[in-house]
Amino acid sequence: MHSSDTEPLLELRDLRTQFVTPRSVVSAVDGVSLSIHPGQTMALVGESGSGKSVTALSILRLFNRGDTVKISGQALWKNRQGQVIDLLALPENELRTFRGREIGFVFQDPGASLNPVFTIGAQIRETLRIHQSNEDAAVLAIQLLRDVGIADPERRINAYPHQLSGGMRQRVMLAMTLACKPRFLIADEPTTALDVTIQAQMMRLLSEIQAKYNMAMLFITHDLALVSQIADHVAVMYAGQVVETGAVHELTLHPKHPYTRALLDCRPIRRYKDQGPDERILIPIKGSPPRSGDISSGCRFSPRCHAQKDVCLQSPVPLEIFSSAQSVRCARWREL
Amino acid sequence: MDPNLLSVSGISKTFELPREGWGAAPRLRAVDQVSFTIDAGEVLGLVGESGSGKSTLGRLVLRLIEPDSGTIHLKGNDIRLLSQRQLQDTRREMQMIFQDPFASLNPRRKVGAAIEEVLELHGMREPQARRARCMELLGQVGMSPEDALRWPREFSGGQRQRIAIARALAVNPKLLVADEPVSALDVSVQAGILALLRELQSQLGLAILFISHDLSVVEVMADRVMVMYLGRIMEVAPTRALFTAPLHPYTAGLLAAAPRLNSGSTPAIMLGGEIPSPIDPPSGCVFRTRCPFAQPACAHEVPVLKDSGQGRLRACLRDDLDLPQVHHV
């Protein structure tokens, strides 16, 4: 466990991201502050639409050219010289050198991130050639494929993306990402599309790679069981805001926010009984996350919360901060 | 008379793929000599990785895909002998729900009309009776009568899956094939759909073939579970037995890979590699290339699915295995 006085590698301060269309302004991220320390893994958890992916994309401004996106706040990055720079204030051309080199990205759908007309070797070598000679790049590319657990890399390097399975493509994506030795990896639902046995391999690989390369990681997922395997800290998001942060075991064993509790409880469980029928525990969260237009003026989770009282509806609930690593946004957590 | 509601015996399906260049078209063996039964009111879980053939098997049972060989008996009648016309009537007894509730509803048809359409197709001519039945169905799946006049796009994924369930139940089926019915939904919504299916199942005495890649979902839903790999059945057992004391190395490997809350670290890898291509499956036991216990004999002999007592079946040549028991919390 790191001491809390080490300086963060990346610190988000009051990040706000809005998508602007002629008809509306959709607020996807609404005041997120997070710190990620060198070599540590922060998990970002929530339902779809909670703003977890947009938070990650905002750090490097990875949006479609056609989208009008307004980002405010700060993303303070400590560079290799120890200087702190705000990524959100960097002009596009300077930010480009950050993408990949300092901060790597692995997405859910590895097929969409690879170019179908080049062999995977060509794609890895191209990434490497920014820093290496051709011969070195060829050798390194094979080494990288071996690092990400691809058997027979000398042969596989000549394969095209479509000749590989989803799990293999995800490994190739990771190899390309590692080519630049980033200090920070953003993994956005990297195992969601994979089978459970391949997921287990990928999770193991990610934690080994992280230790070997001493990378910090932002791991985005909806699965708290995966979080408990890989993360040091967790931030739970709801409707564009962080509602709880904490060390992974504290948060999963003693959640303070009713939403975190509900996310843990909605996992299906069967309790076997020697007498009588087994107990099947299926506790959904009622309703669905708010659309941008109808966000409650009080606690945003209150319409779905079983513990809702008048106090929850009166005014927006601030994030109560206990330490740099622990906070909760709930007016009633002490009573619950 | 067959005591089982559904009795499938030795069905196989091979798909012919488009030719690449010269030579014979490659053949993909999706389902190979599969036999199983489902009792009335029973939930049979079907698990396996993608490429195991579980979705194909679900479609074969309903004859949405024609099997190459084998028999499928529903209430003692071989549905493979039915004409398309007769099959139409039999479909009343067997319905299907799919993974994607966004694709399974016509966006240009209001919810009520979509449900009434099914009723009309199956011979309910009286509009008032149709409307009444539609309201009853919406109530059964936890929706309100007003929802009948709304468009599919106005509903969330979970609500659409409820509508799809109402449509499937419209004709009082005895068997439901549910193919990954909650996989496209947020975890927060999944539990509600699963609880609904379980409730309807016991109320209506429905049998369900419940197909999923998600072990925790199958564990909570199924009475018995069937594990499939590369088109073949590896193991069948009552749910508790399968999840706490697996008898087949593949089942044990799947269970070990499933993420558990607060297990501390990433699990040790029991199953390396990936499922091989069904175009060129391994000889002998199809699982042998990933099996930590494979022996030379496994390459030559195809293990048959054999009774191992207490309602359990497994297909493995090795009788000397001591597989890890799973400690349940």
Image: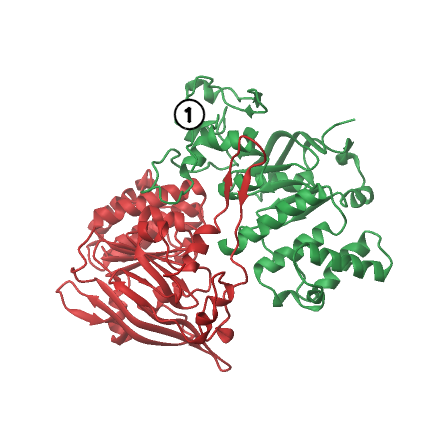
Chain colours: A red, B green
Picture quarter with the C terminus of chain A:
bottom left
Across and down, in percent, residue B64 comes to 69, 44
Across and down, in percent, residue B293 comes to 40, 24
Question: Chain letter of disc 1?
Answer: B
Residue placed furthest toward the front: A335
- Between A142 and B253, the one lying in front of the other is B253
- Between A287 and B2, the one lying in front of the other is A287
Mark 1 — residue?
B323
- Between A166 and A31, the one lying in front of the other is A31
Label 1 crowd bin: few (<14), some (14–19), many (20+), radius 10 Å: some
Q: In which image quadrant can residue B125 be found?
A: bottom right
Q: Does B319 appear above or below A15?
A: above
- Between A127 and B37, the one lying in front of the other is B37
Can residue A14 be seen in this snapshot? yes
What residue sits 57% from the left and 59% below the top?
A: B157
Left or right: B293 as drawn, with respect to B17: left
Left or right: B101 as drawn, with respect to A206: right
Across and down, in percent, residue B65 comes to 67, 42
Q: Does B11 appear above or below B120?
A: above
Q: How many marks?
A: 1
What residue sits 84% from the left and 52% below the top?
A: B123
Assign a secondary structure to mark 1: loop
Left or right: A142 as drawn, with respect to B111: left
| Amino acid of disc 1 | Leu
Residue placed furthest toward the bottom: A22
What residue sits 71% from the left and 64% below the top?
A: B145
Across and down, in percent, residue B279 comes to 52, 36
Q: In which image quadrant can residue B254 be found?
A: top left
Can residue B181 be seen in this snapshot? no
Residue placed furthest toward the left: A81
